[in-house]
């Protein structure tokens, strides 16, 4: 075992400024682990922890001896800003854990998201990274980040190597964790890295940030091509950012980690210019609800309809009714809609049992100030029930245990509606399939997801079969409709007069 002693910690949540606060219970429901529990969870066949953890552990194991010193990892489904008291309690846990390791640790790895918020902190990742420096000083410190990170100067300044995801939908978490292990080994061997950071006044609609095609994909690919030709470059991260974080440091960012400061600066500048050259293409391309209804009824090929404005993976509540209501009224047949978060309705379905007919009342108990979660009622038959404990089959949740809570298949006319107790982005086909639904036989599949469903439902739907529907919601790509407070302005695409540098 011995080898270098590496502290492991993590804080992963994407926070939508306009959503209700996240609480400690939201972390408990996804992944809150302290000390030895972290390694025990990582050793399970389907861990609940972020996949970067297994990647990092595998990467360290593959490159020699080491001793993991697990501290605390907190991860949750995207939500509103973290309740400040709950975040402060987490900070106290990290502080105590790191302080106990002082003088006995050689390096640190932290799983970050990068688009976290606490109620009174625009930059909780920067706060946590600063704590690591304060307690442990200048020791090798590597962090991985979600591609939607809103990158603060403090995040870049307090880490040695900055490693962001390169795929959207996110499919490279394990790889990036392993890359962090490799870079940490280099730092432990005595190498020193420099980081260059550029931020552009581009706060793109989330739907224009795919990595299979489009302007963002081109910049990421260019960065990897150029890095492959220059041994001084250790990592290139092109971070899309998360508009709904509404922070003073929102904006598409390039971070280059390199052994040579000039090489880092030059490549960061080149990539920032490449992104700026493509600035006119970071725009949403949505389909109206009326057109979506028509397509659902008339399309000769099956279609996936993404309810991009109510994406739990961006803080949406996963319960808006615009598409269900419209499809139901129009008599759409052979459709599946999922997954809708409604705990009281899921509980009622479980109490009534399979085969029961009843009036399904959605959103019977939502907050008065919730502008989007409107009530809807329709006669339904309960076709299947489950406890909602599933193992991700494909895409961002692949190989991980996900707890959906009590789950029900409600048949409403020609539409199979999947209702869950928890609140989870519909990114994996297993969320529907585990109830017996056959996605391959559906003519229209509506997913509450902005884009991660593409990594799970690609078996059924090609890019051309995906319709991004324009409905109201907390994650609407129509950015001009939000009451921004902190976003740097002017910024593209909302402010055409934005300039850079
Ligand atoms: Zn992300």
Image: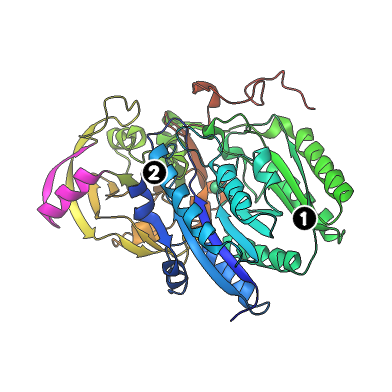
**At x 27% / y 49%, what residue is drawn?**
421
The residue positioned farthest toward the front in the image shown: 103
Q: Which residues are magenta?
A: 342-362
Q: Which residue is mark 1?
A: 224
CA–CA distance in space, label 1 to label 2: 39 Å
> Can I make out residue 384 in this image?
yes
The percent position of residue 283, horizontal first and vertical second, equals 63, 31
Question: Is 481 inside the magenta-drawn segment?
Answer: no
**Crowding at mark 1 (Cα within 10 Å: few <14, some 14-19, many 20+):** some
Q: How many marks?
A: 2
The percent position of residue 335, horizontal first and vertical second, equals 34, 47
Q: Which mark is residue 477?
A: none
For numbered disc 2, what is the local secondary structure? Answer: helix
Which quarter of the figure is the N terminus placed in? bottom right
**At x 80% / y 63%, what residue is drawn?**
191
Q: Which residue is mark 2?
A: 86
């Amino acid at each position: 075992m011995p080898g270098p002693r590496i502290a492991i910690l993590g804080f992963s949540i994407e926070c939508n400024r306009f959503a209700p606060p996240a609480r400690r219970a939201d972390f408990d429901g996804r992944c809150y682990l302290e000390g030895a529990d972290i390694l025990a969870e990582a050793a399970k066949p389907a861990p609940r922890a972020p996949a970067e953890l297994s990647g990092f552990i595998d990467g360290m194991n593959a490159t020699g001896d080491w001793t993991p010193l697990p501290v605390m990892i907190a991860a949750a489904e995207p939500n509103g800003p973290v309740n400040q008291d709950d975040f402060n309690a987490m900070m106290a846990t990290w502080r105590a854990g790191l302080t106990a390791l002082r003088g006995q640790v050689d390096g640190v790895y932290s799983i970050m998201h990068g688009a976290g918020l606490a109620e009174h902190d625009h930059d909780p990742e920067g706060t946590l990274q600063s704590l690591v420096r304060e307690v442990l000083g200048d020791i090798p410190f590597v962090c991985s980040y979600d591609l939607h990170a809103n990158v603060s100067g403090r995040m870049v300044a307090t880490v040695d190597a900055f490693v962001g995801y390169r795929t959207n939908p996110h499919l490279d978490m394990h790889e990036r964790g392993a890359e962090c292990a490799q870079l940490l080994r280099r730092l432990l061997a005595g190498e020193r890295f420099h980081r260059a950071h550029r931020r552009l006044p581009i706060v793109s609609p989330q739907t224009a940030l795919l990595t299979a095609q489009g302007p963002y994909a081109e910049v990421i690919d260019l960065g990897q091509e150029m890095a492959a030709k220059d041994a001084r470059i250790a990592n290139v991260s092109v971070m899309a950012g998360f508009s709904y974080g509404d922070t003073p440091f929102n904006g598409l960012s390039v971070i280059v980690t390199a052994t040579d400061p000039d090489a880092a600066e030059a490549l960061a500048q080149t990539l920032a210019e490449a992104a700026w050259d493509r600035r006119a293409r970071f725009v949403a391309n949505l389909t109206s609800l009326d057109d979506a209804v028509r397509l659902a009824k008339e399309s000769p090929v099956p279609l996936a309809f993404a309810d991009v404005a109510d994406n739990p993976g961006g803080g949406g509540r996963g319960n808006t009714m615009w598409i269900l209501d419209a499809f139901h009224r129009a008599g759409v047949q052979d459709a599946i809609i999922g997954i809708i978060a409604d705990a009281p309705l899921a509980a009622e379905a479980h109490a009534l049992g399979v085969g029961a007919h009843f009036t399904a009342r959605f959103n019977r108990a939502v907050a008065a100030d919730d502008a989007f979660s409107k009530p809807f009622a329709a006669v339904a038959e309960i076709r299947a029930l489950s406890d909602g404990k599933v193992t991700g089959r494909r895409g961002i949740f692949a190989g991980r245990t996900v707890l959906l809570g009590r789950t029900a298949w409600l048949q409403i006319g020609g539409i199979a509606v999947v209702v869950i107790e928890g609140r989870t982005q519909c990114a994996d086909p297993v969320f529907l399939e585990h109830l017996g639904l056959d996605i391959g036989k559906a003519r229209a599949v509506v997913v509450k997801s902005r884009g991660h469903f593409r990594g799970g439902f690609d078996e059924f739907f090609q890019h051309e079969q995906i319709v991004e529907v324009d409905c109201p919601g907390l994650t609407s790509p129509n950015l001009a409709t939000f009451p921004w407070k902190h976003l740097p302005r002017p910024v593209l695409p909302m402010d055409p007069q934005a300039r850079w540098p």
